Image: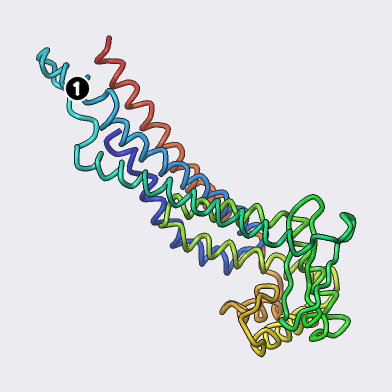
Amino acid sequence: MRFDVYTPLLVSLLLPLVSPVVGRRMAPALAARVLASAAVLTAAATTWSLILLTTALLGDAPPVVREAHEDGRRLADPVPEVIGVAACLALAVVVWRVQRAVRAERRTRRALRRLCEGHPRDTELVVAACEVPQAFAIPGRPGRILVTSAMLGALAPAERRVLLAHERAHLRHRHGRLVTAVTLAAAANPLLGPVRSAVTFLVERWADEQAATEVGDRGTTARALARAALSAGRAARPACALNFTDRAVTRRIAALQTTPPPHLWPAAAAVLALGALAALFSADATSDLVALLWNVLT
């Protein structure tokens, strides 16, 4: 309990350090999956560790320890009081941050779905008359692709195929769920913020690679990215065009001008092992606390 309960925090420091390297050198589909999985495991482990620290302070553990001392038995407090208080405050912040992230996610989903109201349910592509170049993949049953007329007008026919293939990849591989999962993980553990950024970038790279494979031309895919970014930059107000307005667009274009990165399964296993390690140490801390209390009570 004394050391195991703090190990998830150490993993929370290591995972953001390795995520940029993983994102650069590993196939984006695999990298996004393993980083998101490791982040969720680590966030769950750190949250559970906070619960353990808070329970040890506010639950039945301190009275049990005091009773043991009164009976002449040597038993150290499982958690120093100052750490327990800090864990209690941190846990309250975690709950607040997660609730806020969930509300923001729901608002975004509702706003996107309202844009598609009035269209038949079996309509995959919704074209909105708008002067701002935008494109969205809207998760749901069924998923929709929302594209503005300005975006379609900015792209050549072959580049429009890239756009649609990109957005279909988001829907087909449920990228929305992946990003939501890592967003909630970062809300629960702010140290995982860089991992969330890496996964958000990687799902775009993943969709880029899927689009390049579908259209059979990496050069056309790169040109579509560049043209959409330029169109969004000339817009009268900030726009989201396949997420091309972020600073990583040049990295995405450069990646499409090279061969696809390898899968690197051993590295993927190592990243997953980090998340699993955090969960295992958190579970071990739980068993230690239970065993401590059981020994005192019996």
For residue 84, which quarter of the picture? top left
Q: Residue at 48% of width from left, 49% of height from top? A: 98
Q: Residue at 59% of width from left, 77% of height from top? A: 246
Most foreground residue, 63 or 28: 63
Q: Is residue 10 above or below residue 25?
A: above
Q: Is residue 67 above or below residue 228?
A: above
Q: Seen in the image, is 287 located left or right of residue 172?
A: left
Most foreground residue, 291 or 183: 183
Q: What is the residue that sits farthest to the bottom in this orientation?
A: 234
According to the picture, the residue beneath numbered tag 1 turns out to be 65
Query: What amino acid type should be assigned to the residue bearing mark 1?
Result: Val
Q: Seen in the image, is 173 located left or right of residue 30?
A: right
Q: Is residue 147 above or below residue 53?
A: below
Q: Seen in the image, is 170 located left or right of residue 160?
A: left
Q: Residue at 72% of width from left, 76% of height from top? A: 134
Most foreground residue, 230 or 130: 130
Task: State the count of labels.
Answer: 1
Q: Element type at marker 1?
A: helix
Residue 191, horizontal then vertical, whole percent: 41, 57
Q: Quadrant of the C terminus?
A: top left
Residue 262, horizontal then vertical, whole percent: 67, 64
For residue 229, which quarter of the picture? bottom right
Q: Quadrant of the N terminus?
A: top left
Residue 140, horizontal then vertical, whole percent: 75, 52
